C-alpha cells in the first residue's frame, strides 16, 4: 500500500501517470512539463531527490510535487472513491424530510 493518496498527472504530451510514491514522483518529474525551469518545479525535483536520499521527509517532497503539478495545470481532479460515494448517498437519504 502506498503512503500517499494517488495523484493523476496529465503531461503536456498527453500521457498520464498515477503517482503514489516519491519514487513515482521522480519518474513523473522526468516527463513532459510546461516549465521545467520554474522555481517550484526545481524545488520539487530537489526535494524529491532529497527524500530518496533520506535527507528530506517524503511527505514534504510529495507535497511540493503535488503543488507544482497543480501550478502547471497537470494535476487531474481526483474522483471520489466508490465507498465515499456510497456514504454520501446514505447521508443525503438521512437528511431527506420524512414522507
Image (cartoon, grey):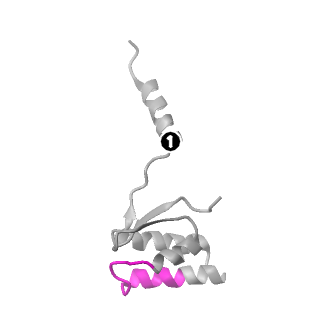
Seen in the picture, residue 80 relative to 41 is either above or below; the reply is above
Residue 55 visible in rendering: no
| Helix, strand or loop under label 1 | helix
Disc 1 designates what residue? 82
As drawn, which residue projects farthest toward the top? 99
Q: Which residues are magenta?
A: 31-47
Q: Is residue 35 left or right of residue 8?
A: left
Location of the C terminus by quadrant is top left
Pinpoint residue 73: horizontal percent, then vertical percent: 33, 68
Please name the residue shown 59% across and 83% down the image.
Answer: 50
Please name the residue shown 41% across and 80% down the image.
Answer: 40
- Nearer to us in this view, 14 or 53: 14
| Badge count | 1
Quadrant in the picture for residue 23: bottom right
- Nearer to us in this view, 55 or 69: 69
Seen in the picture, residue 66 relative to 34 is either above or below; the reply is above
- Is 36 within the magenta? yes
Q: Is residue 48 left or right of residue 78?
A: right
Pinpoint residue 63: horizontal percent, then vertical percent: 50, 70
Q: Is residue 59 left or right of residue 28?
A: right
Residue 34 visible in rendering: yes
Pinpoint residue 11: horizontal percent, then vertical percent: 38, 71
Pinpoint residue 21: horizontal percent, then vertical percent: 58, 68
- Is 3 within the magenta? no
Amino acid at each position: 500500500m502506498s503512503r500517499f493518496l494517488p495523484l493523476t498527472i496529465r503531461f503536456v504530451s498527453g500521457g498520464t501517470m498515477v503517482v503514489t510514491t516519491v519514487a513515482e514522483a521522480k519518474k513523473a518529474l522526468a516527463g513532459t512539463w510546461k516549465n521545467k525551469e520554474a522555481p517550484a518545479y526545481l524545488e520539487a525535483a530537489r526535494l524529491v531527490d532529497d527524500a530518496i536520499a533520506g535527507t528530506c521527509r517524503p511527505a514534504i517532497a510529495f507535497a511540493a510535487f503535488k503543488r507544482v503539478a497543480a501550478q502547471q495545470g497537470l494535476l487531474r481532479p481526483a474522483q471520489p472513491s466508490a465507498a465515499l460515494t456510497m456514504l454520501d448517498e446514505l447521508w443525503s437519504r438521512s437528511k431527506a424530510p420524512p414522507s
